[in-house]
Image (tube, grey):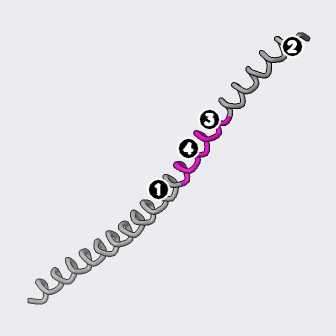
Amino acid sequence: MSEELLNQILAELKEVKSTVNRIEKKLDSTHEQVVRNSESITEILDGHERQDRILELLSKRSLEQEADIKDFKRIR
């Protein structure tokens, strides 16, 4: 191979390495964002589950109170 061809190959190889490095940095950044998003989603889901339990409890209390009111009205 000629020296000119080798230099051209080396220049292209450097360009490819540079491109790979940029892609790796973007991938790292994307991965970090995915991890943060996953943590946020987990927190949101935990809060949602807690709110569901609270709503269920309040619904039961409401039904119990309605039954008590009916009993009081019947007793009178």
Residue picked out by circle 1: 41
Q: What secondary structure is the stretch in magenta mostly built from?
A: helix
Q: Amino acid at mark 2?
A: Glu
Q: Position of residue 60 (x, y in %)?
A: 31, 75
Q: Which mark is residue 30?
A: 4
Magenta stretch encompasses residue 54: no
List the single residue furthest toward the front.
Answer: 3
Residue 75, disc? none
| Dot in front, 3 or 1 | 3
Q: Please identify the quadrant where the C terminus is shown.
A: bottom left
Q: Nearer the viewer, residue 40 or 21?
A: 21
Q: Quadrant of residue 1?
A: top right
Q: Amino acid at mark 4?
A: Thr
Label located before the other in sequence (4 or 2): 2
Q: Callout 3 environment at 10 Å: few (<14), some (14 to 19), or many (20+)? A: few
Tell me the residue that label 2 is attached to. Answer: 3
Q: Is residue 74 left or right of residue 49?
A: left
Cα distance in 3D space between marks 2 and 3: 29 Å
**Disc 3 residue type (three-letter):** Arg
Of callouts 1 and 4, the N-terminal one? 4
Q: Nearer the viewer, residue 7 or 42?
A: 7
Does dot 2 land on a helix, a strand or a loop?
A: helix
Up-down relation of residue 75 to residue 63 (above or below): below
Along the line of sight, which residue is nearer the eye, 46 or 7? 7
Considering the numbered disc 3 on the image, is that residue within a helix, a strand or a loop? helix
Residue 25 belongs to the span the image colors magenta: yes
Dot placed on the residue nearer the N-terminal end, 3 or 4: 3
Magenta-tinted stretch: 21-35
* Residue annotated with mark 3: 22
